[in-house]
Amino acid sequence: MNKRRIMVVEDDENILELIRHTFLREGYDAICFTTGEKLLLAAGLEPPALVILDLMLPGIQGLEVCRLLRQEAGTRDIPIVIVTARGEEKDVVAGLEGGADDYLTKPFSPKVLIARVKAVLRRRAQGTRAGAGNEQPIRIHELTIDPQKHRVDAPGARLELTPTEFQILYALARRPGQVFHRYQIVESVRGSDYHVTDRAVDVAIFGLRKKLGVFGRYVETVRGVGYRLAEEETAGAGSRPR
């Protein structure tokens, strides 16, 4: 992976050129595409350091591109920043839930775009260094959560979680029984400089529970506060998972 290569997919040539020049001035190698299909092919052959992704594209749409990148082993760990004109909360939630690391609406400041990209790359680098250390798999409620492989195994199955879902589960599992406020979940997943709505956290938890299946009941809601992962010795007793 080339640490200075950024891949951009945007069907508006003027915006594409603006983004390309913005990254070139910062010393990045910006590889530009106008369709998601071309981006997927290129990223699969030589993964970049980061992808800038528009949502409204000809052919395959941006959210599907995001999903496909997260699905393949060779591209699932590429940071993705969505840059789009779709700025409603439901669109932001869908983008983050789909696996994006950040979401920026048009019109945007080139300086803000660069700052967001650097922040995403910094957080990913910090996460990689942490994962390369002595972090051991966590085993709880018959689940095995492996931070180095970003993998969750349940009895007889491997669970396919988005990076956000995995990081939330891992954060909760490290301190079972502890209640996490929504802002603490955001900080643990994205970093304290990342802004996201409470609704986006709730949607991510909903998706996590759904993918956990019968184990989703251990991700408990503490009304008016946040969420926790039930301790094994108390799971199913006392408070009722919601």
Image: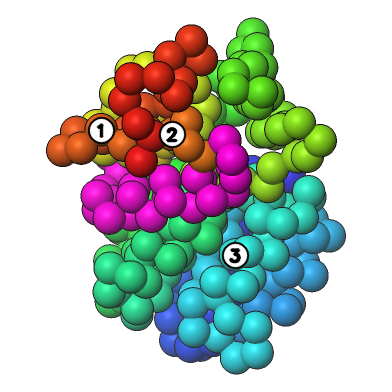
Are discs 1 and 3 less than 8 Å apart at CB?
Answer: no
Residue projecting furthest to the left? 224
Across and down, in percent, residue 161 comes to: 61, 46
CA gap, disc 2 and disc 1:
10 Å
User: Which sits earlier in the primary sequence, circle 3 or circle 2?
Assistant: 3
Mark 1 vs mark 3: give the one in front. 1
Across and down, in percent, residue 209 comes to: 50, 45
The number of callouts visible is 3
* Residue 230 visible in image: yes
Across and down, in percent, residue 59 comes to: 65, 89
Between residues 92 and 127, which one lies in front from this camera angle?
Answer: 92
Which residue is identified by label 2?
A: 219
The residue carrying pointer 3 sits among few (fewer than 14), some (14 to 19) or many (20 or more) residues within 10 Å by Cα, namely many
Which residue is identified by label 3?
A: 66
Residue projecting furthest to the bottom? 58
Q: Residue at x 78, y 48 (%)?
A: 73
